[in-house]
Amino acid sequence: MEPIKSEKTINEAERAVQARQDGPEPFDQQECSITRDKFSPPIKRIVILLTGSFNPVTIAHLRMFELVRDYYHLRSIQVLEGIISPVSDNYGKSTLIKVNYRIEMLKAAIQNDKWIRLDTWEAEQTTWTRTKLVLDYHHEQIKQKYGENTGLRYLSGADVVRTMLNAKVWLPQDIDDIMTNYGVACITRLSAPETGQGGATIPDVKEGMPDLWKKNIDVIQDWVVNDISSTNIRNKLEKGCSVKYIVPDGAINVIRQHGLYNSNASVCLADWPQEEEK
């Protein structure tokens, strides 16, 4: 025998369904408005700049922005935006694919992001551009956009920061200007240190540097184990392996569409059409 549903129960059910339909959209942290009277205003406002080859762009690159924004927000420093600046074709790396493809991948990777943007000024230069000059250019743009008191911070991995002591890689005057005028947000990986993989520990990152440089490096440790390597990704693509959840979906689509990184050299059996048994 079916239970008898009272009119009251039916009305309550209808109201519950209607409330769910009228309820708010899923929480979007980027659109969440802040009740200003509950919090103190930021003590400083900055913009974050990440340079690199992005060959290809990975979720690790994008995750760096989230880590650095959390770090500064916890210290009452407001991050206004993040800028991605890919190197030009004149970087001089044999495995570097054409910048138009790297730009297309980056656009696809951040198309739904509201605070990270792509800037192609560096990519459009006819020669390789020193990082210090890229920072100088963006600093002028930022001052015009946000005001003179807005700072610019260079975002980098620990592997790059360690090379700053190498005069064959960096001009000492450039490093001094970067440290004193901008500062560095250095992301270290939560993994065993590996040469060239950004796994240096916190003491190693600043070891041997002048005290003035040390004061202007903010070391931020990734709290998730991260050994993502663009080199390994390129090798896996050539073998027909999946890079999903490592490379953003939009960037994967660009890679497959153009056959980048020799990704069409092998057949991915996951995509093989199923044949009916005879």
Image: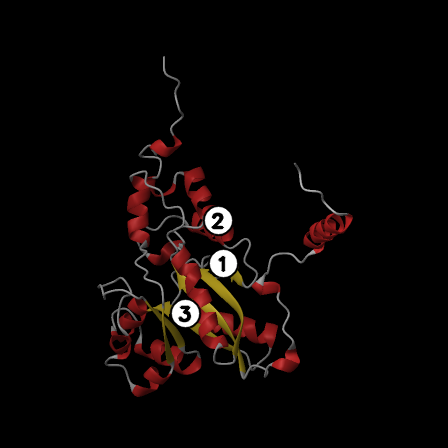
Q: Nearer the viewer, mark 3 or mark 2?
A: 3
Mark 2 or mark 1, whichever is nearer to me:
2
Q: Position of residue 185 (x, y in %)?
A: 40, 74
Q: Are marks 2 and 1 in contact (CB under 8 Å)?
A: no
Badge number at residue 170: none
Picture coordinates of residue 13, whole percent (x, y): 71, 50
CA distance separating discs 3 and 2: 22 Å
Task: Give, as a three-letter code, the residue at label 3.
Answer: Leu
What is the spatial separation of the Cα atoms under label 2 and label 1, in whole angstroms? 11 Å
Residue annotated with mark 1: 120
Position above or below: 22 against 180: above
The residue that label 2 is drawn on is 104
Name the image quarter holding the N terminus.
Answer: top right
On-image quarter of the C terminus: top left
Q: Is residue 202 visible?
A: yes
Instruction: Identify the amino acid type marked 1.
Output: Thr
Tell me the residue at 66%/38% (across/down): 2
Q: Label 2, secondary structure: give it.
A: helix
What residue did someone put label 3 on?
Answer: 155
Scheme by which the image is coloured? secondary structure
* SS at mark 3 in the image: strand
Callout 3 environment at 10 Å: few (<14), some (14 to 19), or many (20+)? many
- Extreme-front residue of the structure: 1
Provide the secondary structure element on which disc 1 rests.
loop
